[in-house]
Image (cartoon, rainbow, N blue to C red):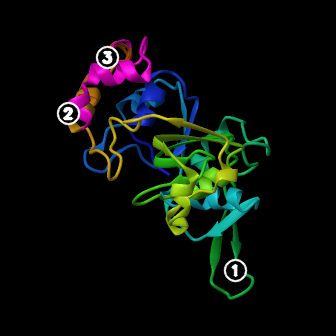
Amino acid sequence: MNGGSHSEFLVGGGCVAIWESCWIGHELYGKYGANLSRKVKNKEIIVEDYSHMEPEFRFAAAAAGAPFSVTQTALGTDIHNPEYDMLGRAGLRDGQRIGKQKYQFMDDPFFGAGQQVLCPAAKVAIALMAVQQVGEEGTVRVAGQYYADPEVARAADTTIVMAEEIVPEEYLRREADRNTVSSFEVDYILQCPFGAHPSGMFGRYDVDGAFLKDFYTNTRTQEGFDAFAKEWIHGHDHMSYLEKLGVKRGE
C-alpha cells in the first residue's frame, strides 16, 4: 500500500525493476524516497502509481480468488489518466502476473450508484511479513494495526513470516480472536528479533529516528547508498547487524 525504509533499501540496492505503490517514507518523518527518485530520474526503474486504497482493493480481490475488485477510489483524479499507465507504455501488460489493463470503468448496473473503477487483482508471488508473534505451526498474531496483512498473506503464492518471537500454538489458541493469519496460509517462519529496524514494532520498540535521518541524509546519491550498504548490509548476518547497532539501542 505504501513503502518505507524497506523499499528504499531494496531500490537503492538495485533489487527493484518495477515499483507499484502510492507513497514512500515514514509517517513520523515524512517522504524520504531519495533512492526511488534517483532511479526514476535515471530511468532505471518503472513506477506504477496508485491511490493509497487501490492496492488494498487489489490485495482483497486476490485474497478472495477474484480477478478484480470494484471501488470508487480516486475517481476524478489524474491517477486514472491513461498516460500514466507506465506498465502499459512499457508493453508489460501480459494478462498473467500483470493485468491486461490497469483499470476499467463501468456504471453500477444494480443500484445506479454511478461510475465504478475495476482494479485487477494483485498477483503476489511472495509475501514477507514482519510481526510480533508467530506460532510454531505458523499462526500469526499482529498487535495493533495490521493494515492489509491478512489479505496479502492469502493472496501470496508463498508467505514468509519474520517474527520477533516464535511461541507455542497452544499459547495463541487461548485467545484465538486476537490472531491475525491462520497457520495454513503461512509457508515459512523465522525468529528475527528487532527485525523491523529501523522501523518500529508496535508494543516492542520504537522507530530509530536517528538511524533513518542518517540513512536519508547519506543515501541521496548512489555512491552514498553503496557506502551505507557496505557498512550495514554486506558481510552481516542479522546478529552481527544487531551487535553493530548496539543491543541497548534496540531495548
Looking at marks 1 and 3 on the same chain, the residue that comes earlier in the sequence is marked by: 1
Indicate the secondary structure of the residue bearing disc 1. loop
Measured as percent of width and height from the top left, residue 184 is found at 70, 52
Looking at marks 2 and 1 on the same chain, the residue that comes earlier in the sequence is marked by: 1
Residue picked out by circle 2 = 210
Residue at point 78%, 41% (across, down): 94
Measured as percent of width and height from the top left, residue 127 is found at 60, 42
Residue type pointed to by label 3: Gly
Residue at point 54%, 29% (across, down): 45
Q: Is residue 231 magenta?
A: yes
Picture disc at residue 224: 3
Residue picked out by circle 1 = 108
Instruction: Give the CA separation, mark 3 to mark 2.
Output: 17 Å
102, 248: nearer the viewer: 248
Tell me whether the residue at label 1 lies in contact with that at label 3, contact meaning CB atoms closer than 8 angstroms.
Answer: no
Give the magenta part as a residue range. Answer: 230-251
Residue type pointed to by label 2: Ala
Mark 2: few/some/many CA within 10 Å (<14, 14-19, 20+)? few
Looking at marks 3 and 2 on the same chain, the residue that comes earlier in the sequence is marked by: 2
The quadrant the C terminus occupies is top left
Q: Quadrant of residue 110?
A: bottom right
174, 141: nearer the viewer: 174
Residue type pointed to by label 1: Asp
- Observer-side mark, 2 or 1, equals 2
Residue at point 44%, 43% (across, down): 3
Instruction: Give the CA separation, mark 1 to mark 3.
Output: 51 Å
111, 163: nearer the viewer: 163
Indicate the secondary structure of the residue bearing disc 3. helix
Indicate the secondary structure of the residue bearing disc 2. helix
Residue at point 32%, 38% (across, down): 32
Mark 1: few/some/many CA within 10 Å (<14, 14-19, 20+)? few
